[in-house]
Structure formats: structure tokens, C-alpha cells
Image (spheres, rainbow, N blue to C red):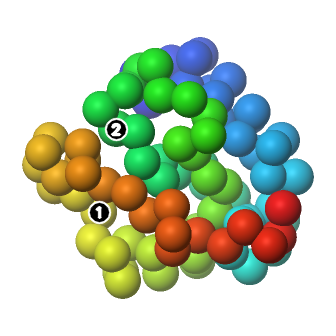
Amino acid sequence: YFKSAEWRRKQLQAKARDRHKCRNCGTYQNLKVIHLSGYEQIPNEPVSCLATLCSKCRTQLYTSYPKPQTLEQHYQWDVTSLVRKDYL
């Protein structure tokens, strides 16, 4: 799924919604799209479950809130409150 055209489309939609900048620091460089929640809905997760972060903020997020390792942990994964919204 993560190599599909559908995932690429959702990434582009999330980046456009986030004005092609990191939702944490506002940079326009080295952007990645991550899941804030919604793993249980893949591949039908809504774009609202996604966020654009730069590589640095993504690394900081995963350092402070470890990325899920099991399917059950993925389903419980919700870091929505850890991502800033004021850069939108």
C-alpha cells in the first residue's frame, strides 16, 4: 500500500492541506507524511488522519512517542495531540 498510487495521492492531499510545510516547525524542507491515527482503516484512512512533518520533527516525535511495533499498538496509535496546528 505504501508504494501505491493511492498512498501517493493521499500524501499529496495532506501536504496541500498543510500548505506544504511542517505542522510542527513550519519548515518547507524534507517533508514526510505520517499517520496521526487511523491505522485500523488502512488503506481507507481519511486524509484527516495524516499530517505533514519535516524529517527532524518526525524523528523527534518518534523519539518521544515510540512508533508502534505490533498491529495492536498501531491500532491504538494516536499522536494527534502531539502535533501543532497553529502553522496551518
Mark carried by residue 32: none
Which residue is labeled 1 in the image? Answer: 67
Q: Is any atom of residue 61 visible in this view?
A: yes
**Label 2 environment density (alpha carbons within 10 Å; few <14, some 14–19, many ≥20):** some
The amino acid type found where label 1 is placed reads Lys
- Residue at the (81%, 44%) spot, across then down: 17
The picture quadrant where one finds residue 61 is: bottom left
Residue 24: percent from the left, percent from the top? Answer: 68, 74
Give the mark, 2 or 1, whose residue is nearer the N terminus.
2
The amino acid type found where label 2 is placed reads Tyr
Do the residues bearing badges 2 and 1 touch, measured as CB atoms within 8 Å? no
Quadrant in which the N terminus appears: top left
Residue 36: percent from the left, percent from the top? Answer: 48, 53
**Label 1 environment density (alpha carbons within 10 Å; few <14, some 14–19, many ≥20):** few
Which residue is labeled 2 in the image? Answer: 39
Residue 19: percent from the left, percent from the top? Answer: 87, 52
In the depicted structure, whether residue 23 falls above or below residue 1: below
The picture quadrant where one finds residue 67 is: bottom left
Quadrant in which the C terminus appears: bottom right
Q: Residue 38 vs residue 22: left or right? A: left
